[in-house]
Amino acid sequence: MNTNIESKMQKTIESLESRLLNIRAGRANPAMLNGVMVSYYGVPTPISSLANITVPEARQLMIKPFDKSVLKDMERSLNEANLGMAPINNGEMIILTVPELTETRRKEYVKQAKSICEDAKVALRNIRQDANNEIKKSELLEDEQKISLEEIQELIQQYNKIVDEHLKNKEQELMSF
């Protein structure tokens, strides 16, 4: 039973990591474009499937499409995605420059990161609650139930530390100049 609970908790951490990646820290990261869809022959397609995305400089993304005919559609999709960056189309590729973060914007991003981490902790608590209810309903002996409940408590403490560590790292990343 614990492996099932632990795998659910691990998935929560993976979700947390991917959500934190979307908070940009003034540095270019190809993951910033996750979720940007381009209409390719009428089919919404992830931009990463249609182009090679590289980071030539710390604050710049270069998007070089495999098929140049989709360049205008990519530019339109990037504008519509409202990423806070203006795409520059030079006929060969699209260049995105990540703007410097102001102190106010950094603090907003830290708040957003804290909120995401709190969501993860809530999800972990829900997993613990479900597991505890399952154990209490089971036909285990009282001592076995107590041991199982303690194991789950240790697991959630372990995973909460992981969440706190992710928050601390993200906060450092956001506040460093």
Image (cartoon, rainbow, N blue to C red):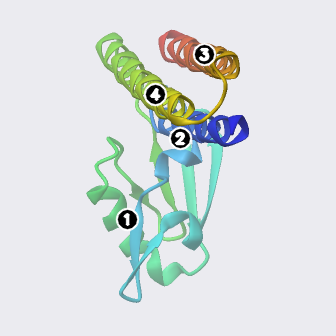
Find disc 1 in the rendering and name its residue: 75
Left or right relative to 168: residue 82? left
Q: Which three-letter amino acid code belongs to the residue tagged 1? A: Glu
Residue nearer the viewer, 175 or 155: 155
- Measured from the top left, where is residue 126 in percent x and y? 43, 30
Above or below 69: residue 26: above
Distance of label 4 from label 1 (alpha carbons):
46 Å
Residue nearer the viewer, 118 or 53: 118
Find disc 4 in the rendering and name its residue: 129
Q: Which three-letter amino acid code belongs to the residue tagged 2? A: Ser
Distance of label 1 from label 2 (alpha carbons):
28 Å
Please tell me which of labels 2 and 4 falls first in the chain.
2
Crowding at mark 1 (Cα within 10 Å: few <14, some 14-19, many 20+):
many
Local SS, label 3: helix
- Measured from the top left, where is residue 121 in percent x and y? 46, 23
Above or below 34: residue 5: above
Local SS, label 4: helix
Q: Quadrant of residue 112?
A: top left
Find disc 3 in the rendering and name its residue: 153
- Measured from the top left, where is residue 156 in percent x and y? 59, 20
Find disc 2 in the rendering and name its residue: 15
Q: Which three-letter amino acid code belongs to the residue tagged 4? A: Gln
Please tell me which of labels 3 and 2 falls first in the chain.
2
Q: How many marks?
A: 4
Local SS, label 1: helix
Please tell me which of labels 4 and 1 falls first in the chain.
1
Residue at 54% from the left image edge and 69% from the top image edge: 92
Above or below 143: residue 96: below
